[in-house]
């Protein structure tokens, strides 16, 4: 029998123990390891790759969204399933951008649904807590409904700098983080964001992130300007 190797990543040892307990009766799923932080998870994956990573969002030092992107940079074949208390469509959107294939919110799925979810993402499918999927669709619809611009002509509407900033907004970066990454002043970031909102007729960061997801702006080549 083919077994799915699994890494559980959560800063709460009680949660890790509970997840392991739920899965220990599944003959096709092997909990290969546990990690209490994103950095610990990366260290384990460098030495012993796994098929699926169960990943919390709220963790100290490096959150789950950043960890997901870092894991896939090292092990692109891994499948990421977010398990979190964060019931926010923007967090879901940012997780998708980071490469997650599933997003389940505690309290919205039964213990017996966890193993099937793992099998789904392992086999190439995707799974999202239904209540959050509805909110995400609404968010994307609002973003697209507020603009007539499509991905094909974003390059003609936004400057290269604005495109870079929109990508970083979609990845959950704050103005201060964007300024540091692009080595520009925070005031310049703020001015660019206001310009993005105006050009694309968006009303805030959530709509901007949703627009970036729907238009796949992160696929555009990175350029300075």
Image (cartoon, rainbow, N blue to C red):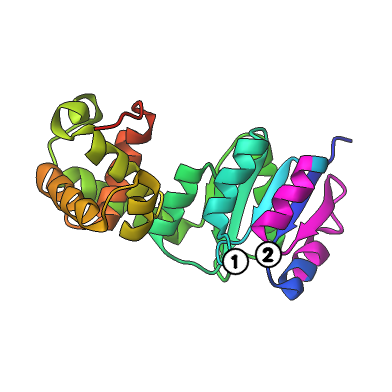
- The stretch of residues the image draws in magenta is 18-46
Q: Which residue is mark 2?
A: 10
Q: Residues within 10 Å of mark 1 (few under 14, many from 20)?
A: some
Return the x and y of residue 87 as percentages of the image width and height.
45, 66
225 up-or-down from 41: above or below: above
Which residue is more in the foreground, 146 or 158?
Answer: 158
Q: Residues within 10 Å of mark 2 (few under 14, many from 20)?
A: many
Which residue is more in the foreground, 197 or 150?
Answer: 197
Q: Earlier in the sequence, mark 2 or mark 1?
A: 2
Q: Residue furthest bottom?
A: 14
Report the side of 191 relative to 42 (left or right): left
Q: Is residue 29 magenta?
A: yes
Return the x and y of residue 164 as percentages of the image width and height.
31, 39
Q: Which quadrant holds the C terminus?
A: top left
Q: Residue at x 35, y 26 (%)?
A: 221
Q: Is residue 188 visible?
A: yes
Q: Residue at x 66, y 37 (%)?
A: 74
Question: Helix or strand or loop: what does disc 2 sit on?
Answer: loop
Q: Which residue is mark 1?
A: 59
Which residue is more in the foreground, 219 or 121?
Answer: 219
Report the side of 94 relative to 148 (left or right): right
Q: Residue at x 14, y 43 (%)?
A: 200
Return the x and y of residue 72 as percentages of the image width and height.
61, 39
Q: Is residue 96 magenta?
A: no
Q: Quadrant of residue 132?
A: bottom left
Q: Is residue 103 visible?
A: no
Report the side of 59 relative to 8 (left or right): left
């Amino acid at each position: 029998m083919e077994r799915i190797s699994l890494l559980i990543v959560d800063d709460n040892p009680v949660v890790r123990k509970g997840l392991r307990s739920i899965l220990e009766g599944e003959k096709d799923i092997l909990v290969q390891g546990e990690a209490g932080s994103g950095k610990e998870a990366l260290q384990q994956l460098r030495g012993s790759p796994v098929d699926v990573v169960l990943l919390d969002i709220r963790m100290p030092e490096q959150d789950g969204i950043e960890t997901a992107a870092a894991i896939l940079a090292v092990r692109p074949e891994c499948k990421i399933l977010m398990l979190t208390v964060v019931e926010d469509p923007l967090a879901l959107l940012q997780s998708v951008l980071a490469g997650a294939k599933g997003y389940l919110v505690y309290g919205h799925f039964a213990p017996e649904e966890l193993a099937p979810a793992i099998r789904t993402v392992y086999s190439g499918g995707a799974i999202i807590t239904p209540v959050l999927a509805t909110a995400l669709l609404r968010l994307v619809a609002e973003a697209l409904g507020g603009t007539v611009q499509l991905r094909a002509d974003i390059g003609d509407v936004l400057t290269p700098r604005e495109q870079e900033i929109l990508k970083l907004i979609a990845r959950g970066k704050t103005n201060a983080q964007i300024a540091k990454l692009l080595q520009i002043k925070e005031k310049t970031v703020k001015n660019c964001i206001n310009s993005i909102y105006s050009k694309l007729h968006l009303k805030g960061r959530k709509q901007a992130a949703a627009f970036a997801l729907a238009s796949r702006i992160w696929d555009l080549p990175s350029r300075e300007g």
